[in-house]
Image: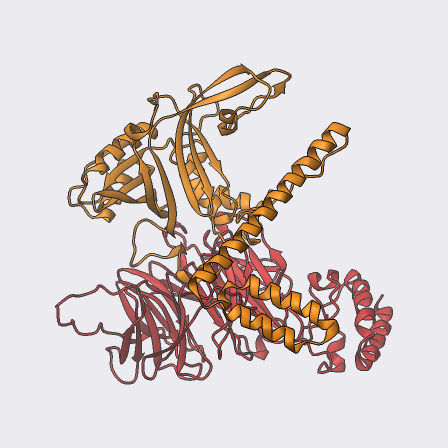
Amino acid sequence: MGGKRKKGESEGMEGDNDSKNNNKKMKQKSEILPSSVKNKEKRSAVHAKLKHQKKVEKRKKLKARDAAEKRALELGEEPAPKQIPRTIENAREADETVCMPDDEELFAGNDADEFSSILKRDRTPKILITTCRFNSTRGPSFISELLSVIPNAHYNKRGTYDLKKIVEYANNKEFTSIIVVHTNRREPDALLIIGLPDGPTAHFKLSSLVLRKDIKNHGNPTSHMPELVLNNFTTRLGHRIGRLIQSLFPQDPNFRGRRVVTFHNQRDFIFFRHHRYVFETKESKQSDSKGKKAKDAKGESIAKEKVVARLQECGPRFTLKLVSLQHGTFDTKGGEYEWVHKPEMDTSRRRFFL
Amino acid sequence: MPRTTTVECPGCPPFRALTFDALGLIKVIEARGKEGGVPKVVERWGDPDASKCVLAASIDDRKTDPLLAVARKSGMVEVLNPLNGELSVTVSNVNSGSARPEDDAIVGLHLFRRQRLELTSRSCTLLTCTTKGNASIRSVEMTDSPADSGASRTWSVCASGNISCSLVDGSESYAIFGGKGVEVNMWDLDKCTKIWTGKPPPKNSLGIFTPTWFTSATFLSKDDHRKVVAGTNSHQVRLYDVSAQRRPVISFDFRETSIKAVTEDLDGHTIYIGNGSGELASVDIRTGKLLGCFLGKCSGSIRSIDRHPELPVIASCGLDSYLRIWDIGTRQLLSSVFLKQHLTKVVFDTNFTEEVKHSAADSALHEAQSIGEVQSADETEKLPTKRKKSSKEDRGSRKKASKDKDGSKKLKSKKRSKILENEFADDA
């Protein structure tokens, strides 16, 4: 009703020349703005019409684009370049802390930091895994899976020891890192990685845990040293976290087993996956969907034969998000933080820290 | 709901600051231009080397012949020229027969201001304090052969425990020391005696006793050595009055992590505190009331705060590798510079000004520029004055080039540039 009244008014008010244009505009305006219609049924009808129009336009555009591309291919010309969809990762805010490849201070800092002795293979990693004081349901199975993923890991029950005492004990026994799995409401929900002897402490929030038995067609990991893939740790903070994760695993360039552990960082969430892979030659013209999953060497497409890596997932699957990175060993009250997440930092949806 | 729109950082007034970091690098950050200057790193001195991590620094920024003392992890104390980073003298702080420098690291360093009379002798006096409590005052000749000459007094500040903060007051005759297990104590430097020791506050109602651990301390004003503000590891800030009593006069809590840096304001009753999770706040110490927090996405522990002697700005640096400049009145972030390493200290260079008009004719001969300035083609570039340095020939030629750019702007500077050109023509 309101819409109709507006139309009537406008026709009466305008002059001759402008009337048509203004009419069109007013018409368009009253069509485009469903919020100006007070009647709910009418309003929803207007809205549905609008949506339908938009859908039709979009489909038309897509068809036109496809037809143009097909025509161009038939004629032998170059098709128009494909448009890149805008994603949040594409639109990420420029971060000045991104590591540049020619930064000598970065390399010097790497040499001087706490992980350099492990990463240069002077020390072999030895991990101590423990839990919080109360542990139940999914915790123990998660820990047993972690023990199979990370080589040279030992599990000790927590008892009622203070974490600071545990750090001392581990230093005495020459461990290189401690992992503490914290459980809340019968679900593991936080991971604390402490580097030793006085390395940084990273506190992660753990979510989306899927155990091995819940994965369809899972495989069983072997006891070879896994290959480590760290994706997308670009900023200085991300680089430091990447090195922290790297120091958990032994560094051996001549690996033999076909086992890969992946930590993929996207939008500040670190996704952990554990696969077994096998290279196969496959005769196919188009790239297989499975081939896309291969994060290591993808085969070259030679005419008809293609080398694809087939993956079989084994081991747990979970996501981590960094809550805080503390400079020394675990000491929440007296310690100093290198990075702690504060809500005042979340001012933009396109800003990420890792 | 956090703010989701971006607020433009207003530009900061011209300043020059030096930052020291965990790899032993000294970076010089300058901001130029009247309004809206963006600070940039103009120089970087030193090579990245973790054993040369800077632990403490002190600047004696007189107008003529300023000096900068830097204490490194390897036990060496270096005296540099803050204008160009040249090493004047290196002093080793390791006493024979004592612990290795890594165990007994230097915690506090102070470079005493020199009187005019000493200018000719070119020596400087340093006070150093280590974690085990060995404090020493020594005067060092700044000749080519670095030797420990003159008076050198060493004494032990504490019997047990570790010192973590030490400071000298404005009149340079009193020093305070405090640390883990060590109460704040004040020493008279002329006589090397302890004149005052603090006492912990009385036990609270639950009977819980927190062990003493002071992580930062400062004198409240330059003229008055009697009021001392100290921050503890258990997020408490305490005001002590030496002339009144041994227990703290006021003490209040601030957030939840240890107070890592305390600096006083020039008005004598405001302090700025920074803690281990990167929170910076200003407090009125007369009442103990929090005036406000500086919000600006600082996510790492604040290691050092410095207040500019003239402009109403403070600089803070810390473990998140950023140097941040804040406006005191509005508590707004003016700018931040990413410096790639964990920063341990920041000092302002107070003699950096950009007024060309104020320079007198005699200082025209000694005018000097930093190297970075010459290469940048900034339109609003002006020469810093009040610096006396011998200009070298290549600098002179480069100076001419930039002087020409500058000279096109103002009549006065044009005239002066002509004078300078003539002078350099004479020199060259």
How far across and how far down the image is residue B263, in percent? 42, 73
The residue lying at 33 percent from left, 56 percent from top is A335
Quarter in which the C terminus of chain B is drawn:
bottom right
Q: Is residue B389 visible?
A: no
Chain letter for the part of the structure drawn in red: B
How far across and how far down the image is residue A89, in percent? 53, 47
The colour style of the image is: by chain
Position of A81 relative to B24 (above/below): above
Quarter in which the N terminus of chain B is drawn:
bottom left
Chain letter for the part of the structure drawn in orange: A
Question: Residue B339 vs residue A217: left or right?
Answer: right
Q: In this orientation, which residue lies closer to the viewer: B108 or A156?
A: A156
How far across and how far down the image is residue B380, in percent? 73, 71
Residue B366: which quarter of the image? bottom right
Image mark count: 0
Q: In this orientation, which residue lies closer to the viewer: B407 or A62?
A: A62
Q: In this orientation, which residue lies closer to the viewer: B422 or B140?
A: B422
Question: Residue B195 vs residue A8: left or right?
Answer: left
Residue B279: which quarter of the image? bottom left
Q: Is residue A312 visible?
A: yes
The residue lying at 54 percent from left, 64 percent from top is A33
How far across and how far down the image is residue A338, in percent? 41, 54
Question: Residue B407 vs residue A5: left or right?
Answer: right
